[in-house]
């Protein structure tokens, strides 16, 4: 019997990486979620550099998942349900290219599925406006500083976490009960 776990990786940006990291850490089939930066021109940027909006990088999470447990399409459906993919370079009060909605695909199959999902959602009129999510080939990922990893888990009582992240996590939990890892359902 093969004990090697099947793994696939995708890199997603949908505003502040703390928000989307918190959701994907609870999604069944997800093996690992790492916050970081991708899509820019600066090698190994700092958080401060990325926040300046001059690096070209987006705040992203890199997700390693088991496609035998969760499909890439489901990963994307969650992605589109937890941020606003119809606003360019903005999520709530976070404004700038570093907060853009972006899918950095790792395979041509991921690219094809991403484009199909966007077309389906636009065709169904899921959102009031068309999706503006960038779909681009993955090039490089730079892991964010340690204090950004597991941010919501470690800082749930902080005001930003309570006001911004917690409602997203609760909405995700309510809409995805069948796909949750073994987590407590109350914060």
Image (cartoon, rainbow, N blue to C red):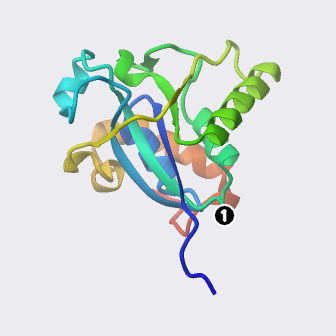
Task: Check disc 1: other Cα within 10 Å, few if <14, some if 14-19, many if 20+.
Answer: few
Residue 60 placement (x, y as % from top left): 40, 36
Residue 71 seen from this side: yes
Q: Is residue 50 left or right of residue 140?
A: left
- Name the residue rendered at 60%, 82% in the picture: 2
Quadrant housing the C terminus: bottom left
Q: Is residue 50 left or right of residue 89?
A: left
Residue 181 placement (x, y as % from top left): 56, 65
Q: Which residue extends farthest right?
A: 124
Q: Is residue 18 left or right of residue 134?
A: left
Residue 127 placement (x, y as % from top left): 70, 20
Residue 98 picture quarter: top left
Q: Nearer the viewer, residue 184 or 83?
A: 83
Seen in the picture, residue 23 relative to 99 is either above or below; the reply is below
Residue indicated by mark 1 = 69
- Name the residue rendered at 55%, 69% in the picture: 182
Q: How many marks?
A: 1
Residue 163 seen from this side: no
Q: Is residue 60 left or right of residue 64?
A: left
Residue 148 picture quarter: top left
- Where disc 1 sits, the SS reads loop
Quadrant housing the N terminus: bottom right
Q: Which residue extends farthest bottom?
A: 1
- Name the residue rendered at 47%, 50% in the picture: 63
């Amino acid at each position: 019997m093969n004990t090697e776990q099947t793994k696939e990786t995708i890199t997603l940006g949908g505003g502040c990486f703390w928000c989307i990291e918190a959701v994907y850490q609870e999604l069944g089939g997800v093996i690992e979620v790492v916050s970081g930066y991708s899509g820019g021109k600066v090698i190994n940027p700092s958080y401060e550099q990325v926040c300046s909006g001059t690096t070209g990088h987006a705040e992203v999470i890199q997700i390693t998942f088991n496609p035998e447990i969760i499909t890439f399409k489901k990963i994307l459906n969650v992605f589109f349900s937890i941020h606003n993919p119809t606003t360019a370079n903005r999520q709530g009060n976070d404004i700038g290219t570093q907060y853009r909605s972006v899918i950095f695909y790792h395979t041509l199959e991921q690219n094809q599925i991403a484009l199909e999902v966007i077309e389906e959602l636009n065709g169904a009129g899921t959102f009031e406006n068309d999706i503006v999510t960038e779909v681009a080939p993955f090039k490089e990922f730079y892991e964010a500083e340690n204090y950004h990893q597991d941010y919501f888990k470690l800082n749930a009582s902080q005001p930003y976490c309570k006001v911004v992240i917690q409602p997203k996590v609760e909405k995700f939990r309510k809409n995805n009960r069948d796909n949750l890892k073994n987590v407590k359902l109350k914060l």
